[in-house]
Amino acid sequence: MNKLLISTLLASAMAFPAAAETLRVGVATAQTGALAPFDTPVIDGIHIAVDEINEAGGIDGKIKIELLEKDVRSDAAQTSIATQELVDEGVSVIVLPCDADPALAAIGVVTEAQIPAISTCASSPTLPQIGGDYMFANFPGDNVQATVSAKWAYDEGHRSAYIIYSPDTQYTTMPLYFAEVFEKLGGKMLGEDTHTIGQQDFSAIATRIAALDPQPDVIMTSTYEPDFPSMLKALRAAGVESQIIGSDGIDSPTTFSLGAVAEGLVFTTAGHPTEGSPLEAFNKKFEEVNGKAPETVFNAVG
């Protein structure tokens, strides 16, 4: 959390003297639908943090946290409705879904109510810019992830690339940032393809890439499940041997269960539990609380 967000949260809490001993946090996230694989683990992490803070006496040892949760069903319109309902219930802070599009649907509500809102893991760099003074991001930006991916690819000796993206959401246009950085580093873009969210047949795209001579050294995409497994399988079935680079949207048990077809896959995400790191410590805490190890970094993001 950055200093501006912390100060805004504290100011918001102080603006409600009648509830001085309780900070009511509204959680309008996707517990069902396409965004649930990301929001659900985040909320698991939030519960651990809130329990830990409250057991220690609350914020600064005196302000307990109360969560008011609503399922927005991965829908932008429902996100706006749920946000208004939470405002009406007197929350001082709002947590929004893990995608810029539904989070931005709540701009009007949070701005009018002057209540700070933070997306669980939306990574579009435009979120706080478009969202204004009350909208905050909580995750490495798409442009940052793409820059890291492009530099890694170039440093690994890859000199040609191909991107696959979808114009349906801001998140799935991340490869456009990758292409810009890769070319500035000296790499060459061999082409690009687009797809729709929910597309399951990627054979045409795979055939086009397989026909390139030579094939690109690397293919970058920010497609996520359930589309990504279909894309990856289609590429390999068509004989495409390029290095595949994905993004945090495939940091999930589904990806790790793909087996040999995912061998060598590289993707960016929020962190890695290196020895002695805070993430390693959180993962141990998560396992103690839940009796199983976390399957994605999104638990810790919460």
Image (cartoon, rainbow, N blue to C red):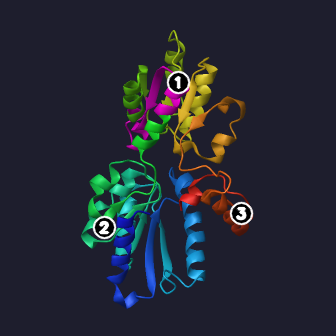
Q: Nearer the viewer, mark 3 or mark 2?
A: 3
Q: Marks 2 and 1, Cα distance to the nearest angstrom?
A: 41 Å
Please name the residue that numbered disc 3 is placed on: 287
Give residue 94's position: percent from left, percent from top.
Answer: 40, 69
Please name the residue that numbered disc 2 is placed on: 110
Q: Marks 3 and 1, Cα distance to the nearest angstrom?
A: 36 Å
Mark 3 element type = helix
Mark 2 element type = helix
- Span shown in magenta: 150-176
Q: Residue 131, relative to residue 94: is it above or below?
A: above
Q: Which mark is residue 218?
A: 1
The residue shown at (47%, 84%) is: 63
Q: Is residue 70 magenta?
A: no
Give residue 259's position: percent from left, percent from top.
Answer: 71, 35
Q: Nearer the viewer, mark 2 or mark 1?
A: 1
Report the front residue among 87 and 33: 87
Question: Among all residues in the image, which is located at the extreme right?
Answer: 291
Q: Is residue 122 left or right of residue 242?
A: left
Q: Marks 3 and 2, Cα distance to the nearest angstrom?
A: 35 Å
**Circle 3: residue type:** Glu
Q: Which mark is residue 209?
A: none
Q: Residues within 10 Å of mark 2 (few under 14, many from 20)?
A: many
